[in-house]
Amino acid sequence: MSASPEKIQKLRLLIGEMSGLQPKEFFRAEDLPLGIPRGALVEVSGNLKTEWLIRFLRQNEKLQAFWMEKEQSILPTAIQQRGVGLDRVVFGEVADLYPAIRRVVQSQLFEVVVVPSAFEELRVLKALQLLAEKANTTVFLLAKKPQPAWPISVQLEVNADPAGAGLQVNLLKHKPAGVS
Amino acid sequence: MRVACIWFPDPRDVVPFAEDCLRFTPQICIREDQAVFLEIGKCYRLYSEEVFLARATRLLEKMGVQARVGVAGSIEWSLVAAKYGSILPEQLPLEALYELADPLGHDPKSQPFVQKLIHALPQLGVSCLGGFRAIPRRELASRFGSVGLLCRQRLDGELVFPWKAWLPPEEIRETITYMYAECPGAIEPLLFEAKRLLDRLFVRLRSRGVQAASLDVHLLCEKVSVNPERERNLTLDFLLPQADAKGALGILREFFAKEFERRPLLSNVEKFSLCVSKTVPCNAGQKNLYHGREERMEALGNLLSQLSQAYGKGSIFQAQLVEERIPEFSWQKVARVEGPGVQLKGRIPLRPTNLVKPQRIEVTENHVYIKKKPYRVKSWSESVERISARWLDGLVDRTYFQVEVENGPLLWIFCENGNCYYLHGYYG
C-alpha cells in the first residue's frame, strides 16, 4: 500500500524540521492541496495554463510577478479583469530570454517569474533551477507540452473541465511530495 | 522701483542672457523667449540709468543679439517702453494692452478677452491708450468685464504687476580631467572613474532632496589623427529616477557597453564630466528602520532601469489601463503604475488572456482555417461583444465571437464588414 502524496510531504517536512533544515515554503494553490513550492521550477502546460497562472496570482495577493515574453501577447486588461492588480506585475518583452531571466531571478525582488518554456538544453534548466533555489523565487515555465527534465520540480497540465466546471488541473509531477 | 526691460523682437532662449545680466543686479525676472527684466532702482549707487543703458547696449553688441531696452517704474511699463519706445498713453497703440494685461505671458487665458477689448474699442472711436483712459471707469466693468478694469488699473498705475524672481538653474556637475594617457578609452577605467563622480553627485542630490532622472555625459578624448570625433555628448535617461550611486553605476555600465559597441573610443580620455540634467523630488526623510520597503523600491527601480538600458526603451514596463474599448489600445506602457487606474468590473465582457495581431482566417460551416491549418469547430457562441469606434479616423466596426475548436484553446474571433473573419486572441 503506497502512502498518499500529502502524507509523504508531511513526513518530509517533519524530517526536515527534526534535522534542523529550513522547511520548504509553499504557495497556496486552490486546485493543488500540495501547493506550489517556493524557489523551484514549475512547468505549466495545457490549453488553459495562462488562466490557471492568473488565478494562482489572484489567490496569492502579495506576490510580485515578472512576466517575460519574446513578443508581448499577454493582455494586461485580461489580467486586471481576473482580479490581479497591474501594480503587482512587471512585463518584459525581450528577444534573448535567458540572460534577462538570470538577472531578474538573481535580484530576488520578485517571488514569481513567468516565462515561456523556450529552453531545450538541460544545463540551462539546471542553472535556472539553482538560481531559483538560491533566490527563493519560483519560475513558471509556460509550455505547449510537458517535457521530461529533472530540474523541473512540479509539472501541471491545465485544460478545460469536460463537465464545464472551470479548469481541470492534472498534476504530472511534484518532486517535494514524491509524485511522478 | 526702476525696472529695465530688454526685449528681443525674435523669440530666443533668454536664460543665457539673463545669466549675463546678473552682473547688473541679482533681481531678475524673465518672460520666456521674449524679454528679461532687471530691477535697477536699488543699484543707483553703483551706476546710473544712462550708464546701465550704455553697458547693456555694449553687452548686446558683444553677444551679437538684436534687442531693445526700456526703463520704467514697473515690469509692464518697462516692457511697453522697450517694445513701443514710449510710455505716453497718447502715443501707444491699443495692442499695448496685451503687455499691460499679462507682461510675463503666464496667463494665456486672458488673451482672448484682451483681443475682444482691442477689437471693440475702435467701434467706440478709441484708437490709442489715451482714448481708453478717457472712458469713464464705471462703464468699463459692464462693457469689457474684469479684464477691461484690470487694464485700466495698470494704465493708471494703481495695480503693479508683482515681481516674479528668476534664479539661474543650478548645474549639478562633476568633472575630472586627466594627464596624458592617464585614462584609457575603455569601459572599465571609465566606470572606475565614474564611481567617484557619481558618489559626489548623489551626495549633492540627497542634500537637495531630489533624485536624478537624467544624466548628461561628456567625454573629451585626446587629439589624435585616428580619432576625428574626440568629443562626445551623450544623454542617459533613467527609466525610473535613481537616488543611489551604486545603482546608477550599473545603468551607466549598460549604457557605455551599448554606446562603445556601436562607436568605440579611439583614444585616451582627457576629460570626463557627468551632469544631472533632470531631477525629481524625493522623500528626503529618515528611512523606516522596521521594514525595507524604500530599499526594495530603490532596488526595483534600479533593476528595471538596467534592464531597460540593456534591452531597449519600452522593453521593460508596467501596464496601465486606459478608457478605450478597442482591445489593442486598451492599455499603455508606463514605467510605474500610479494610482488605481481604470476599473473595468461590469463594463466590458471578459477579454482573452492572449492577444494576437488580427490575422485573416477562413471560416466554413464546420472548420476555421488558421494559417491554412484546419480546426474543427465544436461550438460558436453568440456575439459576445460589438465594438464600433473611431468614426472620424479609421472606423473600427467589429463583432466578436468565442469559438471552441478541437485540440485547441478557446478562440476570440471578430467579424468585420459582414464576411471577413479575423483571429484576434485566445483564452489560454
Image (tube, rainbow, N blue to C red):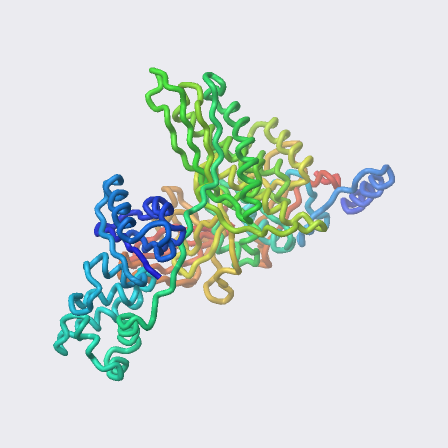
Residue at screen point 22% across, 82% down: B136
Q: Is residue B182 above or below residue A35?
A: above
Horizontal arrangement in the rendering, residue B144 relative to residue B223 (left or right): left
> Quarter of the image containing the N terminus of chain B?
bottom left
Q: Which of B229 and A29 is in front in this view?
A: B229
Give the residue furthest to the right: A18
Horizontal arrangement in the rendering, residue B335 relative to residue A174 (left or right): left
Q: Is residue B288 above or below residue B350?
A: above
Residue B195 x, y percent position in the rendering: 55, 31
Residue at screen point 21% across, 72% down: B116
Q: In this view, does A164 lie above or below B90?
A: above
Residue B224 x, y percent position in the rendering: 36, 16
Residue A45 visible, this orientation: no
Give the residue furthest to the front: B45
Q: Which quarter of the figure has residue A21?
A: top right
Q: Which of B62 and B323 is in front in this view?
A: B62
Residue B324 x, y percent position in the rendering: 40, 60
Horizontal arrangement in the rendering, residue B264 relative to residue A101 (left or right): left
Residue B89 x, y percent position in the rendering: 19, 69
Residue at screen point 64% across, 41% down: A138
Residue B279 visible, this orientation: yes
